[in-house]
Amino acid sequence: MKQVYDFLKEAGTYYLATVDGDQPRVRPFGTVNIFEGKLYIQTGKGKVVANQIAKNPKVEICAMKGDEWIRVAATLVEDDRVEAQESMLNSYPNLRAMYKTGKDGNTVVYYMEDATATISSFSHAPIEIKF
């Protein structure tokens, strides 16, 4: 899992794919955090993407770094604990101007469950990581 975190962190931007009915939706993301041994991402509670995840928590992430790319297939699980939200915003303090934590806040964090990451390149065999 740490290798996946490091890859996404170094890439800076990754693309999260969700499903909206029968239509795939992809958008750029940048938050990734390890909290209590789980890999987390974050978004806003009121965003369309949060609604899509609530309806279907199966997602894929894709990012590129140098001559390698990663794909992560996972099920996202919402963690409504303030501690998990605070951990994320502590890792991205610039987001505190936009996001607030707590039950009345507008941030939502998810950890990845049943995840499989594949790191690929034209110069080496794929590396598969399950977490």
Image (cartoon, grey):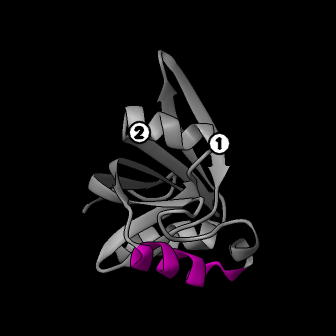
Secondary structure at badge 2 equals helix
Q: Mark 2 and mark 1 in contact (Cβ < 8 Å)? A: no
Frontmost residue, 104 versus 41: 104
Q: Amino acid at mark 1?
A: Arg
User: Local crowd at mark 1 within 10 Å, few (<14), some, or many (≥20)?
Assistant: few
Residue occupied by mark 2: 54
- Find residue 57 and report its image quarter: top left
Query: In which quadrant of the rendered view does residue 111 lie?
Result: bottom left
Which residue, given by chain and number where applicable, does mark 1 sit on?
27
Task: Tell me which residue sits at (69%, 75%) in the image.
Answer: 96
x then y, percent, for residue 131: 24, 63
The residue drawn where x is 68% and y is 82% is 93
89 up-or-down from 50: above or below: below
- Which residues fall within the magenta stretch? 82-93
* Badge 2 amino acid: Ala
Q: Position of residue 33 (x, y in %)?
A: 47, 74
Q: Which residue is at a point 58% across and 66% down the rendered structure image?
A: 31
